[in-house]
Image (cartoon, rainbow, N blue to C red):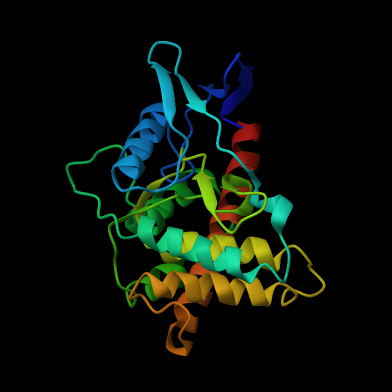
Amino acid sequence: CQHKIEKIITSDKTLYSRTFVGDMSWWSFDKTDLFSREIAAYKICVSHSIPVPSMASIDQDKKIITFTECLGVELTDRLSKSNTDLFFQIGKELAKLHSIEIQKSQKNFFNVNNFLSMLSNLLHEIVENKALEQHLNKLKAEQTQLPEYTVLIHGDFHPGNIIVDDQDDVVTGIIDWEESAVGNPYIDITTMIDCLQGINEKDPTEYQPIITAFLLGYDSASDLGVSKKENIPQLKWWAEFIQFRSQFISEWITNQSKL
C-alpha cells in the first residue's frame, strides 16, 4: 500500500487523512508523483460533478490530503445478486466519468494506450519469462484493431473504492484515485466485472444479474454500447489485458525482490 489512512473525529464532523508514503505507479512502472495525480483527479471530478469526497485540506510538504467523510458504506457491504438498481446507478456514474476528455497538456496522468509498448522494453530489462513475452506480443498485435480513447479512467474501479448509501441506490463517493490515468473506458468496466466474477470462483456467473445491470446502466448514459453482443470481444480482450497486467506486476515485484 502506498498510503496511510487516519480517521479524525472532531466535534462536528469526521475527516480522513491520506498520507502518501510510496510513489510507484503501476501504469508507468516508475517513480511518479501519486500525490499530485490524486489531487488533479479529485479536482477534475469535482468540476464534472462526479461523486468524490471533498478535500478539506492539502499539505504539500508532508503529502497529506484530508477529506471529509463520504456517508455510506463500501460497495463490498452491499454486494447482492438482487441489487440490480444500485449497480445500474454505478454504471451510470462510471459512464459520466468516462465522458471527461483529458487534454494533452494535462501531465499528471499516464496514457494507458502506451502501456503495452512500454512493457516490451521493461520485459527485456527486468523479467525473463518467455510465456509472458508471447502473451504480451499477442495483446500488442490485437490492440491495433481496437479504438483509442483519451478519457479519464479511475484505474482501480472495484467495490472497495466505491461508497454507497446504506439504504438507497445512490453512489456517495468514488475514492482512491492514485492509479487514475488516461485511456480506454473498458479498463474500468472490465476491472469491475472481473471483481464480481471472482467472488465465487466455482461459479463466475453467480453475480451476472448485477453485472448486466451495471452494463445497462453504463449504456444508459453512454453511446459506447458495452452491453451489446457485438462488443463482447472487446470486453473479453480488456479482461485479458487486466489479468495480464496483474500477472506482470506480480512477476515484476518478484524480480525486484531478487535484485
Q: What is the count of numbered marks?
A: 0
Q: Nearer the viewer, residue 150 or 95?
A: 95
- Give the side of residue 89 with respect to residue 144, left or right: right
Q: Is residue 132 visible?
A: no
Image quarter in which the C terminus is found: top right
- Measuring from the top left, give residue 47's x and y in whole percent: 28, 42
Q: Quadrant of the N terminus?
A: top right
Q: Is residue 221 above or below residue 154?
A: below
Left or right: residue 228 compared with residue 256: left
> Farthest right residue?
202
Q: Position of residue 250 (x, y in %)?
A: 63, 47
Q: At x 59% / y 63%, what residue is drawn?
A: 86
Relative to 167, 66 lies left or right: left
Q: Quadrant of residue 2?
A: top right
What residue sits 49% from the left and 82% below the top? 232
Position of residue 242 in the picture relative to residue 118 (left or right): right
Q: Nearer the viewer, residue 25 or 123?
A: 25
Q: Image point 65% across, 34% down: which residue?
A: 258
